[in-house]
Amino acid sequence: MLDVVIIGSGPAGLTSAIYAKRAELSVVVIEKEYLGTGQIAESSLVDNYPGIPETDGYSLGEAFREHAERLGTEFIEAEVTSIEKKDNIFICKCDNGDTIEAESVIFATGCHHRNLGIEDEAKYTGKGISYCAVCDGAFYKDKTATVIGGGDTALDDALYLSDICSRVNLIHRRDEFRGSKSTLERLKLKENVNIITKANVKNITGEKKIESIVLDTGEIVNTDGLFVAVGMVPQTALLKDFDVLDNNGYVKAQEDCRTSCDGLYVAGDIRTKKLRQVITAAADGANAVQSIISLR
């Protein structure tokens, strides 16, 4: 039996692994994606992680993983299908047939992209609709792309695409943006960026792929690609029977990352908090392990 099992290998999970290994705890990291490092891998530019200016998310994520590997962290590539607590022991079953038992669990599964929720969205996914500008932006070189959203991801995506595409439309349902003001100002200086506010996507037109989108204002926007950046959904379904989730599916915990279930800890973007960044995810990973150590 292990001291701790970590589910998820984004910055939160990998930091947990680093601190657990340094504390000489027996630990394993379970990650369903091959060599996964979390959502950070999709960021074209990370310029707010202290000491490492102007790096890209993939490289930063790889640095986290290499650090954990150098300390001897064991990784299992599998998806956890169930978590059960019996006699103060957590039993994690995986889709590869493995069953992992541990005294503590650090749940660090992160979030996934929220859909627009409009008709034909699934039909056009992969045929013009994308949820990752860094992944798919190159397909629209010298073409027109449209970004939907008003947070940091939407602004970063629009800025990234402005260097690739001939034209970028940024559409937000509200009048003001929630994302970084400095990024927004940089976008406003871009001659090929068109910002549209107080508008929602009503429907999509196109035969084999997207050709245009229709807004609820009546405006028709021609576009080759549509990048959706309207928020994230916490991947916490495995914890629904532990009574630790809030109404939005986030795990309730303070800065010590302890949940109301003894032995169950949470780290990263799925924890209830105001700021969701790489640095706060890493801090959660460290705090979760410290909380485990303090009770030993």
Image (cartoon, grey):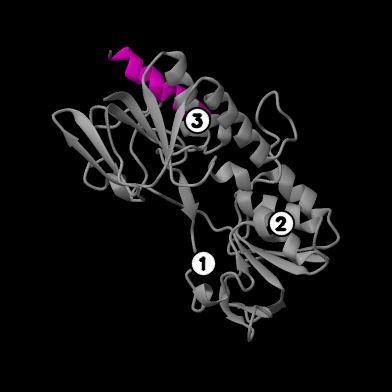
The one nearer the camera, 36 or 136, is 36
Q: How far apart are marks 2 and 1 (CA)?
A: 17 Å
Label 1 residue SS: loop
Q: Mark 1 points at which residue?
A: 116
Residue 267, numbered label: none
**Which amino acid type corresponds to the residue marked 1 in the rendered image?**
Leu
Q: Is residue 256 visible?
A: no
Cα gap from disc 3 to disc 2, whole angstroms: 29 Å
Q: What element carries label 2?
A: helix
Residue at the spot of label 3: 14
Magenta region: 282-295
* Residue 149 location (% of width, % of height): 60, 59
Report the front residue among 113 and 198.
Answer: 113
- Name of the residue lying farthest toward the left: 87
294 drawn magenta: yes
The residue located at (59%, 69%) in the rendering is: 126
Instruction: Please tell me whether mark 3 sits on a helix, a strand or a loop.
Output: helix
Query: In this picture, is 282 found above or below 247?
Result: above
Q: How crowded is mark 1: few (under 14 residues within 10 Å), some or many (20 or more)?
A: some
Q: Residue at x 62, y 74 (%)?
A: 127
Marks 3/1 in contact by CB < 8 Å: the verdict is: no
- Give left or right: position of 257 versus 177: left
Instruction: Decide which of tag 3 and tag 1 comes sooner along the chain.
Output: 3
Position of 59 compared to 2: left or right?
A: right
Question: Which percent across, then down, holds residue 167?
Answer: 80, 66
Which numbered circle lies on residue 158?
2
Q: Position of residue 82 (x, y in %)?
A: 27, 46
Instruction: Pick whichever, 188 or 263, lies toward us.
Output: 263
